[in-house]
Image (spheres, rainbow, N blue to C red):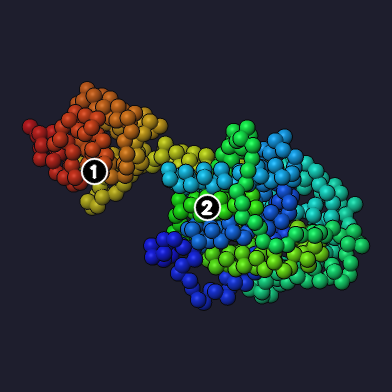
Amino acid sequence: MATGARRYPLMQGLLPVERARLPGDVVAGVTLAALAIPEVMGYAKIAQLPVVMGLYTILIPLVLFALLGSSRHLVVGADSATAAIMAAGLTGLAAAGSAEYVGMAGVLAIMVGGLLIVARLVRLGFIADFLSRTVLIGFLTGVGIQVAAGQVGGMLGVTTEGDGTIEKLIDALRQIPDANGTTVAVSLAVIALVAGGARVARRVPWALIAVVGSIAVSYGADLAADGVALLGPVPGGLPSVALPEAPWADMGDLLGIAVSMMVVILAQSAATSRAYAAKYGERLDENRDLVGLGVGNAGAALTGAFVVNGSPTKTQMVDGAGGRSQVAQLTCAAVVLVVLLFLTGPLEYLPNAVLAAVVFLIGIELVDLRGMAGVARRRRDEFAVALITAAVVVVWGVEQGIILAIVLSVVVHLSKSYRPHNTVVARTDEGRRLELTLDEARPIVPGLVIYRFNASMYYANAERLSEEALALVAPTDGPPVRWLCLDAAAVGDVDYSASDAIRALHSELAERGVRRVLARLLDPVRTELARDGIIDLIGPDAVFRTVPEAIAAYQAGPAGPGAS
């Protein structure tokens, strides 16, 4: 993957094309189209826009990202989080569904696209580096629970109310006695076909078969007469290319909405693409993905669509159907094009319950119980972080979950660097070197302690450095410590506070008659210490390339065991 990315910088998600995988990618693309077409129309309803605008989000924007993005898996299109943010932001600025409202939605897409390009120029793609694998497992698990729970009402044929996932789920369960029997039967049939079929032959596009079959049954058996809700008429034809307009007086409000959506898009897309790159051991260029997302949103604005985002559910649709490159997404766009031109008529007979059942199963697949169990067995503290992330996504929402995921990833890292597992280098009776915990510390030779600090030094652990070093030179029953050698091989950086702590420690050690020396300094760290005057303070002759050099100097010097 890394080689392909270097050879084909403009189409990293497509090239190199693996011929053996082409049939699987094409089938996955057709499956994605069958599932995503009604899904994105649902998101258009959430955004309070004409449903056909949802179809437009998986046409030109999808193609642009496939050509310009880096991820081989991320699917771009309408998304529930950004659709909800947009609807909430535009409420009060224009009447829902009006020409002015539609124009504002288009302007928002342009603004978001521009902000994402700016984010690329300042290289904000690094934000994905703050999303640990543990947090990604929790994030996608939370998204899966949220998605699955949100479909229960649709599978029962009832309308749910509530502000969040939990409230809507509880409301749906309360209405079970009022559920439409035929709708429930349709939902259960789809679940049985898709889930059961996958156990028999996973590569068969069972979800696609369920969608096509349900349309035929709905039309032939007149399911609407039994109270089954159908998708309804869908306008056909290609989108027109035009620049959207909005009143200048509202540009300030629109920019605030655009910034909110940009942050969600940046983080959610990075989280999703990073999770699937990790799953398949692929390299990823998040900054290039920002270009694809930015241009994709600009394309959405010019072709009658609205803001697009990297979608965890659509990405799982492709992955579950066997797609492994953006060939699947281009196939999906081709199918959407055919549908817009010729096949919007049959879509009106699609039962909403079929979509709800399929999306429910997609959500269940996103719930990574095996991954969560693996984290729980190996890292209980990180499992707690993953669990909290999943819970926040379910209870409060995807955008809040992403922000928390980033914060928790940083906190976990800082907690470990704040309390590094520092050691002391010693020797066995046979002369072999070994590392001991500080509780077991002893000199490597009489009077010389080798103290290994196993993290970068910064304001949070500077005091720990001083406390541990002073404890190591405290008087004991044995020979007094004359040299304290800091083995700095694991120290990648020394900030201002840590540098001051080193200076103060040097003075305190000198008062106790202990000489401070350094070994295995990385060049950047040595440069930092020289700039801060630390090297001059302790003396250039107190800096050694290796620990054995420091030991030899101690044994040969006036402070060595043979000194008079």
Residue drawn at the location 38% of the way across and 62% of the way down: 6
Return the residue nearer the eye: 237 or 467. Answer: 237
Q: Quadrant of the N terminus?
A: bottom left
Count of marks, rendered view: 2
What amino acid type is highlighted by mark number 2?
Val
Say whether residue 134 is visible: no
Query: Which residue is under mark 2?
Result: 295
Q: Quadrant of the C terminus?
A: top left
> Which of the two discs, 2 and 1, sits closer to the camera?
2
Name the spot of residue 206 as percent of width and height, x first.
70, 71
Establish if 77 lies above or below 406.
Answer: below
Judge the density around disc 1: few (<14), some (14-19), many (≥20) Cα neighbours within 10 Å: few
Say whether residue 239 is visible: yes
The dot on residue 238 is none
Query: Which residue is under mark 1?
Result: 523
Establish if 49 lies above or below 35.
Answer: above
Residue drawn at the location 46% of the way across and 63% of the way down: 11
